[in-house]
Image: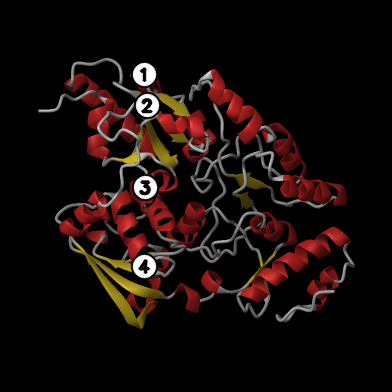
Amino acid sequence: MYHPKMELTNDQQAILNGEKGPTLAKIMETIVRYGDIFDAKRLIKVTHGQGHLVTSFGIPLLKPVYKTMDEIIKSGLSVKEGFTMDPRPLDYKNVKCSALEKLVFNLILYGKQNDYESQLRKIGLSEKDAFSCACYLKEMGNIPEKGDILSWAESSAVNYANSVLGARCNRNSGMIDIFGSILGYVPEFGLLTDEGRMATWKVIIKTSKKPEAQILGSAIGMKVMEEVPYVIGLDKWLGNELNDTVKSYLKDFGAATASNGAVGLYHIDNLTPEAVELKEKLIVKDAKEYIIDDDELERVYKSYPIMWKNKNKSANLAFIGCPHLSMEQLYDWTDRIVKNLKQNNRKKVAIRTILCTAPAVKKEFEKTKQYHQLIESGAKLTCICPLMYTNNPLTKKRRIMTSSNKLRTYSIARYYKDEELIDIICGKEKK
């Protein structure tokens, strides 16, 4: 029997001892061992019971995961309040693939997808459309409140929940997220503590215009890595209200800090909940300082490598939306595509263009005139994860461009600023 370093309550110790079954005892031991590694003093209750699972893909090699799921099902355990998941990997209708690419996807990469989803439904998967990395969007409904304790793992979702919503969650690994949600407890350390949420970096924005969210997030992520930044001066460009436009900006900004670094929490002066409440009291006395101006952002942008085999050829596929686009962003991208096509005397996009969004957002967007304008432009709308598409080695032959720093970081996709991307998509002639 494992003897934990942390202090457990009598009920928690009883679970560890196996009094509520061997499977729950294994889950408890895993969570306790995890906490002991980080010197957690105790377990605390998960107060936002709706979970979110990062492992959403049915890769045949994940045999231990499927075995674990079978044991959980057999024991009758589940996430009582249900859970959402990261996006599905495939959508052949809107993200077309060659016959050979489909063979790799279906047999080698995601051949267990249907079986895996069947397992997940038995332990609490909320619904068939619960697949999005942006589960916190209002249409998806998995929205924690300030101070809520979570058991999530998806880096961009953890980053958003901590920073924009003021909830509390560590950057956990896959399976830890579902274990904590089933158990109802997580170890208290790191971003779950007041001390762990203090900013160790003061980031000062001195740009001449609103910084591009993805590049600003990338710059901060690469500088502070896993530490907590307090950003001063961004409210000049964003205002002090967390409206839909600002939330969409922070979604993309945060995802870049999390993928280009390992940021699980950031504070924006006069804007995010804890910064509004505590202001610069959140900054430790010996905090490091990072000043970002126009030149610094351009330096960061120009540092991104071009990993295409032939760097001089044009892109032939564009992915927009990693993390998934909000409704606000779908409206914006559609309007920009339509406007720029008209300016360039074109009716259709110049290259294959795919926008990615959450299933519930897609359903609502399909009711609008903008949806029909988007489809008439030749662009496609999907709910997959573009990262999972690029897992197929055959897709590396495609010259993918993106405005997502997360997709750029985890694939060979080439990053373009929004304005550059829209010009290429809409066939603007180079002068």
Residue type indicated by callout 3: Asn
Please tell me whether mark 3 sits on a helix, a strand or a loop: helix
Disc 1/disc 3 C-alpha distance (Å): 24 Å
Disc 2/disc 4 C-alpha distance (Å): 33 Å
Disc 4: which residue: 224
Q: Looking at the rendering, in which quadrant would you find the N terminus?
A: bottom right
Dot label at residue 405: 3
Q: Residue drawn at (54%, 46%), measured in percent from left and top?
A: 135
Disc 2: which residue: 353
Please tell me which of labels 1 and 2 falls first in the chain: 2
Q: Nearer the viewer, residue 134 or 398?
A: 398
Neighbourhood count class around disc 4 (C-alpha, 10 Å): few under 14, some 14–19, many 20 upward:
many
Q: Are dots 1 and 2 in contact, CB under 8 Å?
A: yes
User: Which x, y percent locates residue 262?
Assistant: 45, 61
Please tell me which of labels 1 and 3 falls first in the chain: 1
Whether residue 291 is situated above or below residue 418 in the rendered picture: below
User: Which x, y percent locates residue 231?
Assistant: 31, 66
